[in-house]
Image: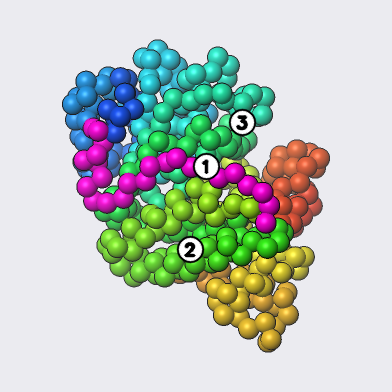
Amino acid sequence: MNSFSFYNPANILLGTDVLDRLPDLLKKYDVHSLLFVYSGEFIKTLGIWDSVKNACEENQIEFYSNGNVVPNPKIELVRELIDLGKEKKIDFILACGGGSSIDTAKATAAGILYDGDVWDFFENKAVPQKAINIGVISTIPSSGSESSNAAILSNGLHKCGIEYDILIPKFAMMNPEYTATLPLYQTSCGLADILSHMLERYFTNTQKVDTTDYLLEGAMRALLVNAKRVMDNPKDIDARAEVQCLAFIAHDGLLEIGRETDWGTHRIEHELSAQYGITHGEGVAIITIAWAKYAAQHNPKKLAQLANRLFNVDPFDYTESQMAFILAEKLEDYFKSLNLHTTLTELGIDETHFEEMALRATHDNTQTVGHYIPLDKDKFIEILKIAL
């Protein structure tokens, strides 16, 4: 196990009555001017809009809102919100929705208190020294951004992320009943994304990490069980509550303590969604399968262990490589059970842009992506070809 420092102060509130706590939370953080960031008018149907507006009125808080967040959130909206935040002296941002809304809020929170362009943070030209406080009302269990220090934005064909502890939300409110209103496709993409966050942490070359190995395996097992329950009965609120728990647990940092993580799959998918605008959850499903097939040939050890512990594949019957290929098949079965596409061809994507995506991700082949198997340009392209 590696040395580590774990820090996560996010206050997680889950239940059907969590919004009743909002007025007191806003008072706790001495909010005077609030920016409400969201995506879609569904929040009004769910009653979230009225609850937030009433909480602001109760505390005599100036209220501003923007519902223009889109999937794969864009830098242009963040810049617009930063200008609004500076003009209106915003001192708290409340994000409602999934990762796109939360990441938009995080970048805005850092940019409001910065004199330069917020994209400087994403290009590693500057480090945010401070950020205004953020709160979250989570309606899409997926990204885990509600409890993480990370934010990901797109700037044209460049999709980049930052990770700073000052971006961890002060609180995240989760009502599983909200998630029951999601289209099944969004639910499926979320279930794929949650598993991918666990796998990115599981595949490591760090030795003697039994604690987090077993925690991750248990979380994955719980996800498989509750994903099936949700797919069988989308109105199963107990199963949806479990999924909401797993979404933030997968990404709050605890499951990666003491171990090097991979993230090769995510870096490949980020190029895909930047290039083609595909949904992140479906993209990681496709690339996870392809990456596992590649890893089965080049570094199967950790995949074989997971095949044994999660799917009871007997190491006396198979080689490590064979076990790793079986794991890839099991993962494909899981994603298919969510009714997701599992190849790029099904999405109408061919090899046309593979090389330019690989060159962007590897900075003209001067860097590698991922840690379990470092991927240069050629390996990056090979995995994309497996995904066809």
Q: How many marks?
A: 3
Alpha-carbon span between mark 2 and mark 1: 20 Å
Image quadrant for the C terminus?
bottom right
- Counting from the top left corner in percent of width and height, residue 316 is at 69, 86
Q: Position of residue 37 (x, y in %)?
A: 37, 31
Q: Is residue 102 above or below residue 127?
A: below
Residue found at x 58% / y 53% = 256
Q: Which numbered disc flags the more N-terminal residue, 2 or 1?
A: 1
Tag 1: amino acid? Tyr
Visual colour scheme? rainbow
Task: Work out how far the residue at label 2 is from the one at label 3, CA to CA, in angstroms.
Answer: 31 Å
The amino acid type found where label 2 is placed reads Ala
Q: Is residue 264 left or right of residue 117?
A: right
Give the residue number, with chain letter if any, for mark 3: 122
Q: Is residue 263 left or right of residue 183?
A: right
Residue placed at 39% from the left, 66% from the top? Answer: 226
Name above or below for residue 210 compared with residue 168: below
Region in magenta: 1-24
Please give the label number shown on residue 219.
Answer: 2
Q: Is residue 356 visible?
A: no
Rendered location of residue 302, percent (x, y) = 67, 67
Q: Helix, strand, or loop for circle 1?
A: loop
